Amino acid sequence: IKETQKRTNVGLIATHNGKIVGACHIRTGRFREAHVGEFGIAIKKEFRGIGLGSFLMREIIQLAKTELKPKPKIIKLGVFANNKPAIALYKKMGFKQVAVLPRHLEYKGNLVAEIIMYLEV
């Protein structure tokens, strides 16, 4: 809440029949990274593939441009290298892959690569 009040974080929640089915946020960095917004999103399995992720991403990016101080110039994210649907969504939204960190994240007991992507806004 403090980050939202300071205008360094914006978030959205998607609900269906009173239950949360998706959420996303953009949080700006500090000091020399104050122009960079870190993006995160989560969608319940049964609500994936219907356009909810695209909708939330478009809305949160617009919200970040109008509400965050300072306005982000870059939005970055990290994604599991084996999450092909998410990577396809991010590319569709204009994000570019800039790095791969091998064995950086743990997923189901295995170490997998993390792909770092960014979007200039």
Image: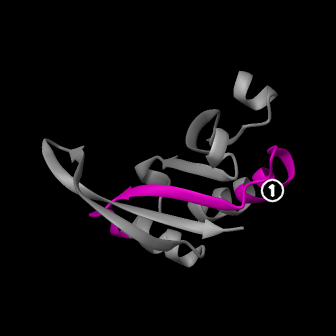
Seen from the viewer's position, the closer of residues 31 and 111 is 31
**Which residue is the extreme one toward the left?**
110
Seen from the viewer's position, the closer of residues 2 and 47 is 2
Q: For residue 72: magenta? A: yes
Seen from the viewer's position, the closer of residues 90 and 34 is 34
Query: Residue at 65% across / 33% down in the picture?
Result: 18
Seen from the viewer's position, the closer of residues 77 and 41 is 77
Q: Is residue 61 above or below residue 23?
A: below
Q: Which residue is mark 1?
A: 65
Q: In the figure, residue 4 lies in which quadrant?
A: top right
Query: Residue at 65% across / 61% down in the picture?
Result: 74
Q: Is residue 52 visible?
A: yes
In this image, 56 relative to 53: left or right? right
In this image, 34 relative to 78: left or right? right
Indicate the secondary structure of the residue bearing disc 1: helix
Q: In the figure, residue 73 lies in which quadrant?
A: bottom right
Image coordinates for residue 71, horizontal then vertical, percent: 79, 52
Q: Residues within 10 Å of mark 1 (few under 14, many from 20)?
A: some
Q: Is residue 13 visible?
A: no
Image coordinates for residue 115, horizontal then vertical, percent: 36, 63
Image quadrant occupied by the N terminus: top right
- Region rendered in magenta: 61-84
